[in-house]
Amino acid sequence: DIVMTQTPLSSPVTLGQPASISCRSSQSLVHNDGNTYLSWLQQRPGQPPRLLIYKISNRFSGVPDRFSGSGAGTDFTLKISRVEAEDVGVYYCMQATQFLYTFGQGTKLEIK
Amino acid sequence: QVQVVESGGGVVQPGRSLRLSCAASGFSFSSYGMHWIRQAPGKGLEWVAIISYDGINKYYADSVKGRFTISRDNSKNTLYLQMNSLRAEDTAVYYCAKDSNNWGADYWGQGTLVTVSS
């Protein structure tokens, strides 16, 4: 199974400042078809997860452009350009390149 | 709009069975794969199973293989998860999610809580 490791596990951020979360996979996430199936999910307190980013850097429908994703191979990053209060929650990376799909441990984003 | 709504959760004794349902609307259900993903209380996400759009291909996490069965009824736009021989460690919120047919799960339901306890 592919192991996904996120850092940091907790990230206190000042409103209006940027935030960054890293995700590393135990093996390359490049699929045989040439795509890399790495997604980012947001889970606000008491809510189900919500897809933010798919295939490394594509924002899902309705996701604000302050969220961006980057990376390649085994190293990926989610960036929030200016953190807003509604961004508080836990962020997960997820790989869908290989069954079984696996998630990172989650990074808790909180406001300082 | 795309909507998936889980039901069937509850409290069940260890070793017993439970069946979860997921009613889908707002998209062509029979054209998309579907997932079950769970989250133990205060823990992270664990992918459980996936079924192809036509119900033919199914994959399971090792932790549930042989005990859980994913199925679907495309005539009713409904996904199921039959859970047998339940254990305390199966206690979790179970989410149903639509597959994008490309990059993984995109739309998630609100979840249904399963508690395995005597």
Image: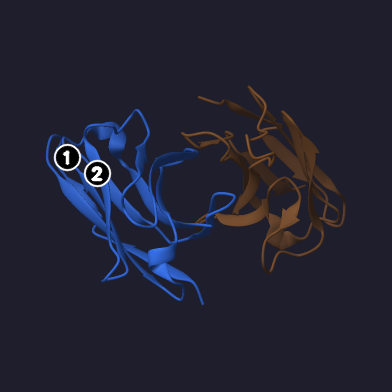
Chain colours: A brown, B blue
Dot 1 surroundings within 10 Å: few (below 14), some, or many (20 or more)?
Answer: some
Occupied quadrant, residue A22: top right
Q: In screen coordinates, is A23 left or right of B1? A: right
**Residue at the spot of label 1:** B84
Give residue B52's mark: none
Residue A82 screen position, x and y as percent: 85, 56
Q: Chain of mark 1?
A: B
Residue A98 screen position, x and y as percent: 53, 34
Residue A73 screen position, x and y as percent: 74, 30
Q: Residue at x 69, y 46 (%)?
A: A109
Front one among A32 and B83: A32
Residue type, label 1: Asn
CB contact under 8 Å: marks 1 and 2: yes
**Residue at the spot of label 2:** B69
Occupied quadrant, residue A52: bottom right
Front one among B30 and A95: B30
Q: Are marks 1 and 2 on the same chain?
A: yes
Mark earlier in primary sequence (1, 2): 2
Q: Residue at x 81, y 45 (%)?
A: A19
Rounded to the nearest whole Å, what is the CA distance between mark 1 and mark 2?
8 Å
Q: In screen coordinates, is A90 left or right of A74? A: left
Q: Residue at x 57, y 25 (%)?
A: A3
Front one among B14 and B56: B56
Residue A81 visible in the current orientation: yes
